[in-house]
Amino acid sequence: MTVLVVVDGGEGGAARRKPGEIAGRWSGSEVYRTETIELRAGDRVRWTRNDKGLGLVNIHTAEVVAITGGKVSFRLEDGRMLSLNEGDPQLHYLDHA
């Protein structure tokens, strides 16, 4: 049996997905809404998605150190510094802590 999920993409669009063929390694699907948040130096944020390459674990927090030249710099819980350019996909997976 094949399961097909149709998600309203807004503005008259629809997205068709087969949950067993996309997303997480356990054959799951992800549904989320992107919202714009304002960041300022000193803000605490938390990651909402793991990124093994960057060493980010969801629920870990960081402090926004600076926002300059289209780049956001963070101090992570373990003391490491991380800078992400505007448009970096990882910026979609953070929220205020």
Image (tube, rainbow, N blue to C red):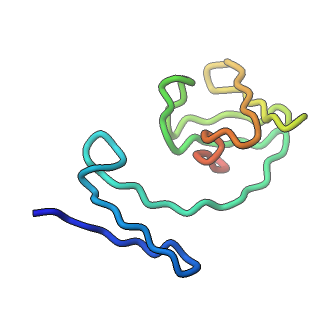
Residue extending furthest toward the bottom? 12
Q: Quadrant of residue 38?
A: bottom right
Q: Quadrant of residue 47?
A: top right
Q: Nearer the viewer, residue 15 or 86?
A: 15
Find residue 50 and report its horizontal and vertical position in percent. Answer: 48, 35
Q: Residue 16 sits in which quadrant?
A: bottom left
Q: Nearer the viewer, residue 81 or 29?
A: 29
**Vertical comparison of 21 with 68: above or below:** below
Residue at 70% over, 25% down: 82
Q: Residue 33, how many percent across, how many down?
A: 55, 63
| Left or right relative to 54: residue 70 | right
Toward the left, the furthest residue is 1
Residue at point 67%, 38% (across, down)? 88
- Residue 95: give x, y in percent of width and height: 63, 50
Q: Is residue 13 above or below residue 25?
A: below
Residue 80 shown left or right of residue 38 in the figure: left
Residue at 9%, 63% in the rendered image: 1
Q: Residue at x 67, y 43 (%)?
A: 45
Q: Is residue 74 left or right of residue 46?
A: right
